[in-house]
């Protein structure tokens, strides 16, 4: 997950990541934030695909899901 975003764009992505984490009941720890920041910034197609699939399948974002996404 390497993608550099600076300034206002980074702030907007961070804010959107927190909004989505709150909406899906995702605990706001650093690992989860990294995953959701990556998702919102669309900087890792694999992470985006996995989260999109989980959302479409209405899967729960539990600790196992968090760990799996983070380890990718």
Image (cartoon, rainbow, N blue to C red):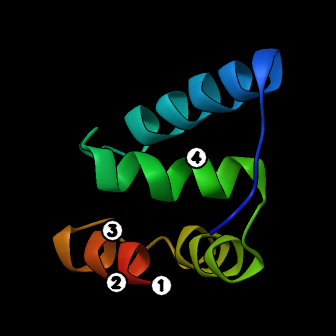
How many neighbours does mark 3 have within 10 angstroms: few (below 14), some (14-19), or many (20 or more)?
A: some
Distance between the alpha carbons at the discs numbered 3 and 4: 19 Å
Nearer-N-terminus badge (4/1): 4
Q: Going by the image, does 46 lie left or right of 29? A: right
Residue, far top? 8
In this view, 61 is above or below 5: below
In this view of the protein, which residue sits in the foreground, 63 or 2?
2
**Residue on which disc 3 sits:** 60
Disc 1 on helix, strand or loop? loop
**Residue on which disc 2 sits:** 68
Disc 2 on helix, strand or loop? helix
Residue 70, quarter of picture: bottom left
Q: Residue at x 34, y 83 (%)?
A: 68
Disc 4 on helix, strand or loop? helix
Q: Residue at x 45, y 36 (%)?
A: 23
**Residue on which disc 1 sits:** 72
Distance between the alpha carbons at the discs numbered 2 and 3: 13 Å
Q: Nearer the viewer, mark 3 or mark 1?
A: 1
Nearer-N-terminus badge (3/1): 3
Nearer-N-terminus badge (3/4): 4
Q: Going by the image, does 41 lie left or right of 51? A: right
How many neighbours does mark 1 have within 10 angstroms: few (below 14), some (14-19), or many (20 or more)?
A: few
Nearer-N-terminus badge (2/3): 3
Residue 32 location (% of width, % of height): 35, 53
Distance between the alpha carbons at the discs numbered 2 and 4: 16 Å
Residue 53, quarter of picture: bottom right
Distance between the alpha carbons at the discs numbered 4 and 1: 14 Å
**Residue on which disc 4 sits:** 37
Q: Going by the image, does 22 lie left or right of 38? A: left
Q: Do the CB atoms of the residues marked 1 and 2 lie less than 8 Å apart?
A: yes
Residue 45 location (% of width, % of height): 77, 77
**How many numbered badges does the structure rendering display?**
4
């Amino acid at each position: 997950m390497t993608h550099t975003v600076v300034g206002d764009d980074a702030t907007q992505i961070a804010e959107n990541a927190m909004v989505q984490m709150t909406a899906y009941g995702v605990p706001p720890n650093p690992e989860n934030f990294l995953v959701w920041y990556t998702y919102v910034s669309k900087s890792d197609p694999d992470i985006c695909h996995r989260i999109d699939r989980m959302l479409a399948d209405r899967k729960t974002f539990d600790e196992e899901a968090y760990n799996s996404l983070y380890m990718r």
